[in-house]
Image (cartoon, rainbow, N blue to C red):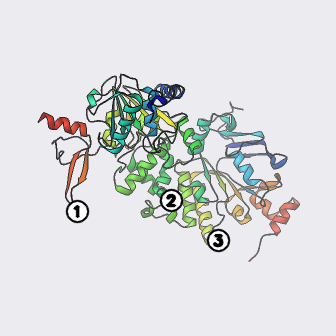
């Protein structure tokens, strides 16, 4: 590939300005889905084209980029997006949460609390939280505009009626700054409390659906629930089998075909850091 | 008009409502008043403009001219087409109900009966699962659906049950006015009779006002107090149901009444 034929960070400057305008609007209206002219990216839809465009629009030569996929730095999606930005922007990359200025993520928020000045970029497949029960885009937009969110509770009601509890465990709907109901992308609901009053800027990019939304630093993010069925996060009985951490989100790893399994940290950087300390 | 605060006043005032589809007439210059607790039937053959008129009143279709005033709970008359959209939609899901001919149009077919009935409650801010479920079961009982069907999807219900579920879903917020478009269409006669019986009971018990569009004069006879006969978009006769059916004045009404099949 001839690098010289690419602009810094792949996208041309006009496109970046367009995306930045959408991001600024999204930050100004927390939780509101801003339409943008999503571009074709050199990867298939569903692989993070939205997140990549957001990252490309905000990244500078001095940024340090971390990319995670389900919490891990070493899985296909994370490795290839990291390599992509190394190639087209020649930026420093890291796997350390604390060192990164931009973290692009698919489905997790790092265990280490984020700080001011850090930006978390989410890859979003379906940005519309109401889509499950209302397929018409014209109607969901009107519902957002008029703050008609009763339908969101119909989904949670249905969960309790079928499973005895709110069984939605990822893409759990939240209300942002008391106004817009937002889909936090398919992160486990375990991570929802981390979004509330986070000092980091959170940007969400949905490439196929052509939407960008944002949660600015120190914003109210409340998970929806019922008075008699309050919001709860997942809990794990065992600590991580590798580092012994508790109170973190664990992945199940199948070891053999005789039922052997172990539970390990989904956040690989956190797990490594814990093991180094011991 | 908006300062009218008389206690004993009509619930709905329709004044000169017309709807044109291009040069064709949907309905023309219809005026009437609907009083609290009253059931009005709009009858006529297919294409006579009954559903157009109903949709014009229920804010589902913008009339070409004319006004529709509704007496709000604070006793003020409001032109429903001059309200903001947010207020109008709130009115539609709290103080009004709309029963579709095809229950699939008025129900969410992919969620349980309980969620269907509870949706309006959740839309107005009810956030206690146990209470929502209890009122859903209570309303299912009132429309003669067993409480153990509360977690079944409407897909598993028969046509008559779906229609009753749709009625429960509309009545749960205790509306004062309910619009019905051929509520018994597509049901066999014994199911139809039960549904009409149920509707008549609920209307009496809750003091509901209702506007029922039907082509079936027997339905109109059973549940309505007054009726309006429409032909080609115009009202040809208007009066107490028994008077219109027993002593029809307009030639078209006479034709309609004499066309009823006798068994």
Q: CA distance from mark 2 to mark 3?
A: 21 Å
What residue did someone put label 1 on?
Answer: A257
The foreground one among A241 and B239 is A241
Residue positioned 27% across, 27% down in the render: A99
Q: Is residue B58 above or below residue A275?
A: below
Residue positioned 54% across, 64% down in the render: B161
Query: Pointer 3 indicates a residue of which chain?
Result: B
Mark found first going from the N terminus, 2 or 3: 2
Look at the image and tell me in which quarter the C terminus of chain A lies: top left
Helix, strand or loop for disc 2 = helix
Q: Is residue B220 above or below residue A1?
A: below
- Regarding residue A214, the answer to whether it shows in the image is no
Horizontal side of B188 relative to B14 (left or right) equals left
Q: Which mark is residue B189?
A: 3
Say yes or no: labels 1 and 2 on the same chain. no
Q: CA distance from mark 3 to mark 1?
A: 61 Å
Residue positioned 25% across, 40% down in the render: A268
Q: CA distance from mark 1 to mark 2?
A: 54 Å
Q: Are marks 1 and 2 in contact (CB under 8 Å)?
A: no
Query: Pointer 2 indicates a residue of which chain?
Result: B
Horizontal side of A51 relative to B69 (left or right) equals left
Circle 1: is it few (<14), some (14-19), or many (20+) Cα within 10 Å? Answer: few
Point out residue A270 in the picture as x, y percentages from the top left corner: 22, 36
What residue did someone put label 2 on?
Answer: B142
Circle 3: is it few (<14), some (14-19), or many (20+) Cα within 10 Å? Answer: few
Query: Pointer 1 indicates a residue of which chain?
Result: A
């Amino acid at each position: 590939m001839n690098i010289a034929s690419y602009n810094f960070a792949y996208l041309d400057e006009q496109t970046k300005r367009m995306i930045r305008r959408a991001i600024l609007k999204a930050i100004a209206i927390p939780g509101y889905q801003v339409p943008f002219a999503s571009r074709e990216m050199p990867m298939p839809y569903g692989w993070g084209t939205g997140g990549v465009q957001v990252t490309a629009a905000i990244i500078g030569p001095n940024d340090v980029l971390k990319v995670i996929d389900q919490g891990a730095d070493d899985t296909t999606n994370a490795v290839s997006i990291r390599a992509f930005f190394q190639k087209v922007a020649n930026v420093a990359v890291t796997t350390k949460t604390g060192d990164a200025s931009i973290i692009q993520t698919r489905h997790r928020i790092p265990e280490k609390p984020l700080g001011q000045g850090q930006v978390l970029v989410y890859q979003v497949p379906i940005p519309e939280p109401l889509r499950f029960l209302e397929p018409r885009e014209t109607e969901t937009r009107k519902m957002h505009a008029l703050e008609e969110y009763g339908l969101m509770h119909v989904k949670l009601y249905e969960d309790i009626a079928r499973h005895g509890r709110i069984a939605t465990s990822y893409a759990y709907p939240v209300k942002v700054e008391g106004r817009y109901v937002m889909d936090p992308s398919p992160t486990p609901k375990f991570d929802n409390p981390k979004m509330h009053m986070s000092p980091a800027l959170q940007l969400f990019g949905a490439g196929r659906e052509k939407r960008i939304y944002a949660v600015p630093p120190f914003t109210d993010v409340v998970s929806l629930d019922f008075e008699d069925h309050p919001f709860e996060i997942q809990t794990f009985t065992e600590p991580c089998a590798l580092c012994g951490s508790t109170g973190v989100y664990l992945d199940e790893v199948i070891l053999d075909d005789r039922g052997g399994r172990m539970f390990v940290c989904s956040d690989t950087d956190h797990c490594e850091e814990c093991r180094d300390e011991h | 008009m908006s300062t009218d605060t008389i206690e004993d006043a009509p619930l709905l005032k329709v004044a000169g409502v017309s709807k044109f589809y291009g040069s064709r007439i949907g309905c023309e210059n219809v005026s009437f008043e609907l009083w609290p607790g009253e059931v009005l039937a709009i009858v006529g053959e297919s294409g006579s403009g009954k559903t157009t008129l109903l949709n014009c009143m229920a804010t589902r279709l913008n009339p070409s001219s004319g006004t529709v005033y509704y007496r709000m709970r604070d006793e003020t008359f409001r032109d429903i087409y001059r309200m903001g959209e947010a207020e109008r939609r709130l009115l539609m899901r709290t103080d009004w109900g709309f029963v579709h001919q095809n229950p699939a149009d008025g129900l969410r077919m992919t969620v349980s009966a309980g969620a269907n009935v509870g949706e309006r409650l959740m839309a107005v801010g009810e956030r206690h699962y146990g209470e929502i479920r209890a009122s859903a079961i209570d309303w299912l009982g009132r429309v003669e659906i067993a409480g153990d069907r509360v977690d079944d999807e409407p897909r598993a219900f028969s046509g008559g049950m779906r229609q009753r579920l749709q009625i429960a879903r509309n009545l749960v917020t205790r509306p004062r006015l309910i619009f019905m478009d051929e509520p018994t269409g597509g049901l066999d006669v014994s199911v139809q009779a039960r549904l009409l019986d149920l509707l008549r009971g609920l209307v009496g018990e809750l003091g509901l006002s209702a506007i029922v569009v039907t082509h079936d004069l027997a339905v109109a006879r059973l549940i309505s107090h007054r009726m309006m006969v429409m032909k080609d978009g115009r009202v040809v006769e208007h009066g107490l149901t028994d008077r219109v059916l027993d002593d029809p004045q307009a030639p078209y009404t006479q034709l309609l009444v004499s066309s009823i099949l006798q068994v």
